Image (tube, rainbow, N blue to C red):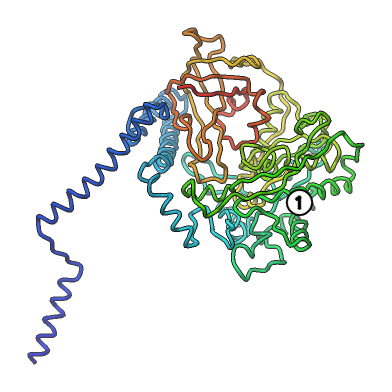
Amino acid sequence: MADFDLQRSREQTAREQVGVTRISRATAWLLTLALLLLIGLVTVSQHVHDLRAALRGERSTWLPQSLEILRAVPEALDVFHTSDQPFFSRVLAANRLLLREMGAFEDDLEDASILGQLVRPGMQTVLTRLGVGNEQVYVGRDGWLFYRPGLDYLTGPGFLVPRQLARRAAAGNEWQPAPQPDPRKALVDLHRQLRARDIELVVMPTPVKPMVHPEMFAAGLNKAEPLNNPSYAAFVRDLEQAGILVFDPLPILMRAKAETGQPQYLATDTHWRPEAMQRVARELGDFLRQQDLPALRAATGMRTRAVEIAHTGDIATMLELPQDSPLFPPETVPLEQLLGARDDFWRPDTAADVLLLGDSFTNIFSLEPMGWGEAAGFAEHLSLALQRPVDRIARNDHGAFATREILARELARGRDRLEGKRVVIHQFAVRELAVGDWKLIDLELGEPLPSLFFQPEPNHPLEVRAVVAAASPVPRPGSVPYADHILSLHLVDLEHDGTLLADPQAVVYVWGMRDNVWTPAARLRPGDEVTIRLQAWTGVADAYDGINRSELDDFALQLEEPTWGEILE
């Protein structure tokens, strides 16, 4: 009996002590002070870092980063008081602005945190060596890296499954409208508008890396059979039934892989190798001729020049490793640059009867800021295959709608970019079928209207002082596979030498991110004053128009002729 009572006493004591930790008052005070000191040290260090950045001109305000969100309150109040909408609509509009600014603040905080900048590269090195990667990058075999959205496209549900379409259509929030998820609607609508002008549409869904090289992601995956989303076959069938031509590069790349035994994609980048891209361009040229679209012309004086380029891929950059990290050295590839009759680099021709709408798969090897050379991309080699000029509209991101929006704005401004066209090729990364916003966009030709927005004379830049009225968002460095980004500003009260200009406002494109680092412009907010040098956008459009860019929310501002800006302070 005594043993039983002793056992029960021990069990009762154990139950009473489970989850209970007793510490002395002195120890409790010591731990509390240490925690407060650590929090205070991080906060003070961040504030000192922000002050130094402001003194160097890298930030537009001396306010601590934690207080910058308060700068959005006056703008929200202004939206509430100046709108002529009903009361609750004004409340929602002001709330949307605050939510958007809070989201931008969270991204800014994550990027600019001095503690994160100190700790993240080392931690990411450890995780990468363990084969983990990060939220956007998966580590494959033999030094290969994979972009998560490409794998999500393959492993996720069918993008045309009704439940999936409904889920994406309801995915909007207070500050970001839901996407139009069905690519068939947008492409059939584009086909209808082009056919009204006797223009043929060719849709070119471009494979992502794990579709062609699953064996480099994990051992044991089938090396010969191509992979795809469960809805892809139905997507192609529906487009062809609507009379739309579909050119699928996947069989071409799989055949090239089998015949040559060589990789078709870059090991640390999201994009294809130049040899694979050139083969697809030649096959697309043959496809267009088989459809009796542009006829073969006599040689136009084009020739190629062989060069080599070494670069580290965009996925490796997204890992945010230390700059001197040896984990993923630069990859060297051969390029075939396209030269004209005067030995100048190939340029798109707006008078050509072939228009290519493309994304980063078009820009790679063509857009020099991407780091993989220039004048050797998909449009260049399609032009070579056809032996004729080609027009090009390409933007690195948002292949589902970005190039159609650019074309629509050109037309709305009264510039008929479709005049004389016989075929429009819509090239986009196939993952856009599952994640893109396939909004319906009207291609209506407008009338050129007089503008009250400032335009500098070509080759005559002008330094002005101005106030920021609106700024487009900039993605957090490392969150997208592009190291550079251009943002849009609406500037008002333009002054030169203290005198207000006759046209005192402008829509200005400026660098928001370079080499995965935010520029001071990325932190501009409405009400900030800036000194900026403006020049004609036409002087830099060939070099910068393909770079990922965010636009202003006001569509009327998107229709204004932009200028290019360089912030001076």
**One can see residue 170 in this view:** yes
Q: Nearer the viewer, residue 331 or 68?
A: 331
- Quick one: which residue is furthest to the bottom in this view? 1
Percent of width and height locating residue 8: 13, 83
Quick one: quadrant of the C terminus? top left
- Looking at the picture, does residue 188 appear above or below residue 209? above
From the viewer's perspective, tell me whether residue 431 is left or right of residue 568: right
- Looking at the picture, does residue 88 appear above or below residue 40? above
Residue at 32% from the left image edge and 38% from the top image edge = 46
- Looking at the picture, does residue 69 appear above or below residue 205? above
Figure label count: 1
From the viewer's perspective, tell me whether residue 328 is left or right of residue 394: left
Mark 1 element type: helix
Percent of width and height locating residue 99: 42, 38
- Quick one: which residue is furthest to the right in this view? 298
Residue at 45% from the left image edge and 58% from the top image edge = 127
Tell me the kind of residue under disc 1. Leu
Tag 1: Cα neighbours inside 10 Å, few (<14), some, or many (≥20)?
some
**One can see residue 553 in this view:** no
Quick one: quadrant of the N terminus? bottom left
Q: Nearer the viewer, residue 49 or 224?
A: 49
Q: Nearer the viewer, residue 42 or 549?
A: 42
- Quick one: which residue is furthest to the left in this view? 2
Residue at 41% from the left image edge and 33% from the top image edge = 91
From the viewer's perspective, tell me whether residue 244 is left or right of residue 518: right
Mark 1, residue position: 239
Percent of width and height locating residue 294: 87, 40
